[in-house]
Amino acid sequence: MGGRPSSPLDKRQQKQLRGQVDTLLRNFLPCYRGQLAASVLWQISQELGPQEPAGCQLLHSKKLPRVREHRGPLTLLWGHPPQWQPIFCVLRGDGRLEWFSHREEYENGDHPLESTPLTGYTVLTSQSEYLRLLDALCPDSSGDHTQEDLLLETPVQFPLFLQHPFRRHLCLSAATGKMQRAWSLALQGGIRLRGTVLRRSQAPAARAFLDAIRLYRQQRGHFGDDDATLGSDAEVLTAVLMRQLLPELRSQTLPGLRESGRARAWAWTKLLDAVHAAVLAGASAGLRAFQPEKDELLAALERTIRPDVDEMLRLQARVAGRLQAEVQGPLESCLRRKVDMQLPRVTQTLLSTLEAELTVVQTLLTQGMDRLSRHLRRSSSGARLRKEVHSFGEMPWDPELMQTCYHEAEQSWGRLGQLTAPFGFFGTQSLVFGAQDLAQQLMADAVATFLQLADQYLTTALDCDQAAQQLEKVGGRVLKKFRSDIGSARRKFIHGWLLCIFLPFVLSQLEPSCKAELPEFEGEVLAMGSPALTIEGIYEDVVRGVLLQRINQELKKALGASNVSCTLVDCSEAPWDQAGADVVTEAQRGTCSKQPGSGTKVQPLCPLPPPGTFQS
């Protein structure tokens, strides 16, 4: 599967796709504008409301998001006709895969032969599994074996197949099993980084975009959550349209492909890739064109909403109270009949998955801190200490090390899928990515906190044993903070994902009856004259609030704790994300002087560490 010498789409098809992208944007952007207004109202209400104390004890690492750059020789099946050819591959820190003819081209700064963002890809290391997947793309294919069939059926000892539902596949091969595993882990990290960019963001516009996508799809009868929201805004819009186009493409285009065997499947992926590229280009251009309007809209919303926010919130609460009295009966009936039986099982599965993963994180963190303490007692080499500190600081971005944590989340994939599929939830990949992001973020925060405190407390007045003892005390403090942060992060993560799983389902069940009651409440909301308040938004908040009461009760039982409450505004957004959050750090409390990397002047630990050894 190689480059694109020409597009398989003719001018008529390209024009038709442009029209379909324009229609998508024309229908989606009103949803987006409405959710931007709602997000501004939410943000202002949070600023003016009671400020709860920050729950995070660890310093916030500012090194995420990134993946460790990975590069090396591979073999790629590409060209026309396709052949296995040696290339030099580079996985960039932003999750983009590039390849060159030779290493020298990369080292000289030449442009790559090709590059591709890894959003939406899946890595397969089994040739037989990939061949079954390829056969499933065109199950009715028949005919003689082609050159492509023979090439793929020739055993490849260490394959790396990158599969995508709407893009060309990349067939790669490594020279050794060790290289295959290293590349597989690196590629998976790049895929996750690209996929969770919107869910990690704290920007109101990102929150508004995801809500708008959900509402846009609900208006078209699609209430369940899935993995369409993996990627950037343009990539998400592209995935949404590709899902709409796929049935028509299959029925109208697939029968006309002349190829047979697996060459037919390859031709199909080539066609999908061309359609995807055209849709992505149109979606990207449309969102770029909307950007100036969006900036002006956000500024105007800020000016108009802030003076009237108190009145708007009072109206919102008043209408919500009346609306809840109207829908409470059908809503409670739906929850009792269809949610209450499965909520404990889903909650417990999420909880056990997260606890298993974070237990491994704590074990790795403890082992890393213990290694540094032992090294201080055993070695007098400053160079070796710097190496150990660097290795410790890189733990959150070590793919092999972190895979021991990530594996715990991956193991629950099948079980979670079985439990949540009856509710129309097919976003298990996104959920697993979210759990892995959480593990990496907590590890990074703990590492940054340990290095900060170590830089403060290790001075020239200490000998090696005293320094090791201080490091052990620092490690104990970090673990205490880590366990505290696990509690709050775990609750927020489970709240968010339980809402993702059950809220669309409950809304779909109430759609026929309760939606009919909304027009009688609409006049008062329309009289307010603000796009930030809609009767549909208030109705959804009411349903969310009642569902959250159920979730809180279940979490309280599952955790055996008394304080698991989560306010509506705290939990109305999906999965936990600490990036950009305000945290109370040691420096803010006055016990630490500065953040790591801020130019802190640190006295060296005599005679071992030179100045700044423990700065992260």
Image: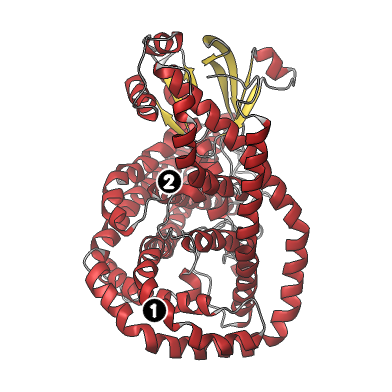
Residue 479 location, quadrant:
bottom left
Label of residue 365 in the image: 2
Identity of the residue drawn at 45% across and 8% down: 147
* Residue 280 visible: no
What amino acid does circle 2 point to? Leu
Q: Nearer the viewer, residue 7 or 309?
A: 7
Q: Nearer the viewer, residue 141 or 276?
A: 141
Residue 15 in picture, x, y percent from top left = 67, 39
Does dot 1 land on a helix, a strand or a loop?
helix
Residue 386 in picture, x, y percent from top left = 58, 34
Label of residue 514 in the image: 1
Q: Nearer the viewer, residue 311 or 405?
A: 311
Quadrant of the image for the C terminus?
top right
Residue 27 location, quadrant:
bottom right
**Residue 527, placed above or below residue 410:** below
What amino acid does circle 1 point to? Cys
Does dot 2 land on a helix, a strand or a loop?
helix
Q: Residues within 10 Å of mark 2 (few under 14, many from 20)?
A: many
* Residue 412 visible: yes
Residue 364 in picture, x, y percent from top left = 40, 43
Identity of the residue drawn at 35% across and 48% down: 357
**Residue 57, placed above or below residue 123:** below
The Cα atoms of the two marked residues, 2 and 1, are separated by 50 Å
Q: Residues within 10 Å of mark 1 (few under 14, many from 20)?
A: some
Residue 223 in picture, x, y percent from top left = 42, 61
Q: Nearer the viewer, residue 427 or 57?
A: 427
**Residue 196, placed above or below residue 392:** below
